[in-house]
């Protein structure tokens, strides 16, 4: 029997000079986070580190030890700045090998695309003992070793890799969420939020203010693994807002 | 005299259950990164942590020690889930006080907006010894203590706070960048990239592949604090691409 109260966790290491320079807006955190949620796995921490072996090794070794799963994005391509495979091998204390199956996949993919050059063969490198994660989009596979999953930096490719991993990872009860929006300054309802959260032990309520159309409002996000208690909590929050003569908008604003 | 070779660094701690759940797409990393670049400060690492005191304290204490500056975003509002001030005070081993100037700012701001309630007064709380960071948008200020800068979670407010800090932080030579785009699979030019980077000691070249209009291409980003060497490096890369009969597009694709 599965222990339904067991919480499964994951972390992400984004290998990304391009994120740290501000040049590229990261899109992998949110897509992996949402995907993990569906698998019943909670994203606990994300680190964005430079394209630097020591920085990657440090982050990987801490996060793989304290989470069930660790995802990395970026640095698995064919160019000189792609060093994630080397860093993970170093973190695990294993050699880098050319993975025979990855080599075969790339040979087949590049058969009609100019052949498998030395540079392209770099994309078949993997830490010794690794398995592959299928990538229908560009041939070059992702890499799985132990509890580490190495994904692409390009979000569209990572999406394909996540797709091929769907249902493969053990998780717990998915954390569900329900949003209630309200045109109210959050400071006017903070006591209500705290009291409502306290009265529903298995729910957390997050408050996310916004400014739109010259007005202030907030979305209150209730998160729980228990759909019934989440509904009770939402109803309590809605009647609390009604008592303050504020209209609650299911689904958020 | 300023030591022009001194590299100034910063880190960011994003306090954000809403980022980790995938509900919200972070926009603070890129805006802070770009702003830091203009100040001559390099963003070295980012951590996204849960709304959890211990997680915030751990990240803050490691990152403030090994960087010149540490920015946090999120968790400084008036609701029960806003715990960043408490976490930073704990990390620094100081008390949380009600900052007199923050209280005065909030009293004035809420004078015509329903008055300064207990909940709103939470936004005047600060670690003992802190200074304020002006926020023209919503009254509640950011907080500066030592090398830590506590910014809002709402990107528009953080933008205002960054604006008021512009020119206030010591930095080094700004890291400049120049992008060359090319409709080429990066695997075909990886040797050229590596050789060009090696020949220009003060330049780094990042390669960022993309898939558009059914074709593969890549942007090559040259980064350097030396504009002249960056130009020489770009010219070398362009002629290298020309030798391979590939058209280089300044500014990227």
Image: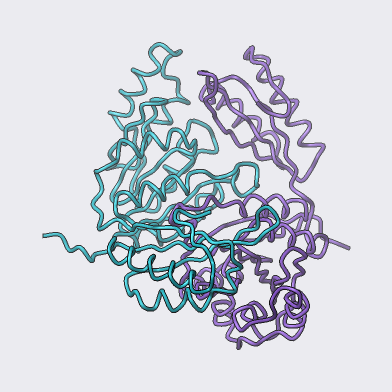
Chain colours: A purple, B cyan
Residue A12, image x, y percentages:
60, 61
Residue A20, image x, y percentages:
45, 57
Residue at x-position 46% and y-position 60%: B180
Q: Is residue A150 found left or right of B142 in the rendered image?
A: right
Residue at x-position 75% and y-position 25%: A235
- Considering only vertical position in the picture, is A90 above or below B112? below
Q: Nearer the viewer, residue B236 or A105?
A: B236
Q: Is residue A67 found left or right of B41 in the rendered image?
A: right
- Considering only vertical position in the picture, is B221 above or below B39? below
Quadrant of the drawing holding the N terminus of chain B: bottom left
Q: Nearer the viewer, residue B184 or B167?
A: B184
**Residue B54 in view of the camera:** no
Residue B45, image x, y percentages:
44, 60
Residue B41, image x, y percentages:
32, 55
Q: Nearer the viewer, residue A160 or A120?
A: A120
Furthest-right residue in view?
Answer: A1
Q: Is residue B14 found left or right of A38 in the rendered image?
A: left
């Amino acid at each position: 029997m599965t222990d339904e109260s067991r919480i499964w966790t994951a972390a992400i290491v984004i290998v990304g000079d391009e994120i740290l320079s501000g040049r590229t807006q990261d899109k992998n955190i949110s897509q992996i986070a949402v995907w993990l949620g569906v698998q019943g796995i909670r994203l606990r921490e994300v680190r964005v580190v430079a394209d630097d072996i020591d920085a990657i090794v440090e982050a990987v070794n801490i996060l793989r030890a304290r989470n069930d799963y660790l995802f990395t994005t970026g640095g698995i391509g064919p160019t000189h700045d792609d060093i994630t495979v080397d860093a993970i091998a170093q973190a695990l204390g294993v050699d880098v090998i050319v993975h025979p199956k990855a080599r075969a996949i790339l040979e087949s993919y590049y058969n009609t695309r100019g052949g498998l050059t030395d540079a392209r063969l770099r994309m078949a490198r993997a830490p010794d003992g690794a398995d592959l994660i299928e990538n229908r989009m560009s041939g070059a596979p992702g890499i799985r070793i132990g509890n580490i999953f190495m994904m692409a930096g390009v979000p569209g490719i990572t999406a394909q890799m996540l797709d091929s991993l769907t249902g493969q990872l053990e998780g717990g009860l998915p954390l569900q969420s329900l949003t209630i929006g309200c045109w109210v300054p959050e400071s006017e309802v903070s006591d209500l939020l705290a009291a409502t959260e306290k009265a529903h032990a298995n729910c957390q309520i997050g408050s996310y203010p916004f400014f739109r159309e010259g007005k202030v409002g907030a979305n209150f996000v209730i998160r729980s693994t228990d759909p019934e208690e989440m509904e009770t909590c939402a109803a309590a929050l809605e009647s609390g807002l009604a008592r303050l003569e504020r209209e609650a908008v299911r689904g958020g604003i």
